[in-house]
Amino acid sequence: MFALGKAGLTLTQSWPWIFALYALPALVALAVVWRGVPETRPAAEVTPVKSRPISSQLLALMGIVAVTGASNAMVWPLLMIFLQDSLGAGIEALAMAYLPAAILSSFLPSRMGHFADRLGRKPLMVGGLVGGALASALIPHLRSLLLLALLWAVESVGYAASIPAERAFVADIAGEDTRGTSYGLYTFAYFLGALVGPIAGGWR
């Protein structure tokens, strides 16, 4: 966005280029998956497994995930405007403040997944969600970009701990025959919450 701005494009003119740059690696990933990833369940075609109903644990997790998705999406439409007003910071300064959190989010989930295997799913789910929630609750009281960067980093660590544990928990409770359905419901619950969140958060 900043590079296109320096090239003389307005923000409105930059969006098509930004989405095009996003679409290109997505198309490359699609081609790699289509050509290079083998069938993961070839045995099921020969020996089908018996289906079973979705568990109550999965339904409870879907509720938690929906609330999490709604709360995250509820804040984001307002957050940049609020921070610019309260901290007097521009978009570039806020982007730099978010940079440590973005870096942590890029490599921490794979590391935190090991802890989910060793310590169990629920402790990391609870600890990560509580830590992320507390960091989010403190953000409106900040008056420093440095503290904002620190809280964003803490929030990223919390969600990097909870999300791999949630997905591993889905795999644990789904069973072999409903794993795809369970992951689909898990994703559906998150984005259903993300659909409601911005509408509720941006209402006023």
Image (tube, grey):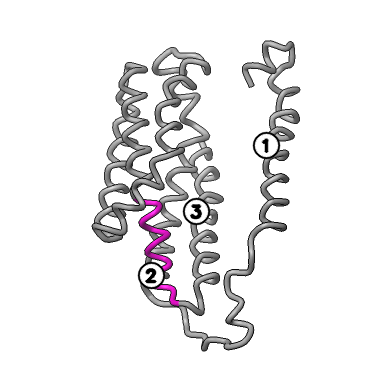
Q: How many marks?
A: 3
Question: Quadrant of the rendered structure where residue 14 is?
Answer: top right
Label 3 vs label 1: CA separation? 24 Å
Give the x, y percent position of residue 203. Answer: 53, 40
The answer to whether residue 128 is magenta is no
Q: Range of the magenta residues?
A: 162-175
Instruction: Give the structural element (helix, strand or loop) at label 1.
Output: helix
Give the x, y percent position of residue 84. Answer: 46, 18
Give the x, y percent position of residue 138. Answer: 29, 31
Instruction: Report the magenta stretch's main SS.
Output: helix
User: Nearer the N terminus, badge 3 or badge 1?
Assistant: 1
On the image, numbered disc 3 is attached to which residue? 193
On the image, numbered disc 2 is attached to which residue? 172
Q: What residue type is labelled 1?
A: Tyr
Q: Residue at x 41, y 54 (%)?
A: 67
The answer to whether residue 167 is magenta is yes
Of badges 3 and 2, nearer the viewer stands 2
Q: Which of 113 and 138 is in front in this view?
A: 113
Q: Which residue is drawn at 62% across and 17% down?
A: 2
Query: Around disc 2, counting alpha carbons within 10 Å, would you say few (fewer than 14), some (14 to 19), or many (20 or more)?
Result: few
User: Nearer the N terminus, badge 2 or badge 1?
Assistant: 1
Contact? badges 2 and 1 (CB < 8 Å): no
Placement of 187 over or under 143, stated as above or below = below
Please indicate whether residue 196 sits to the left or right of residue 144 in the image.
right
On the image, numbered disc 1 is attached to which residue? 22
Q: Which of 90 and 86 is in front in this view?
A: 90
Give the x, y percent position of residue 71. Answer: 43, 46
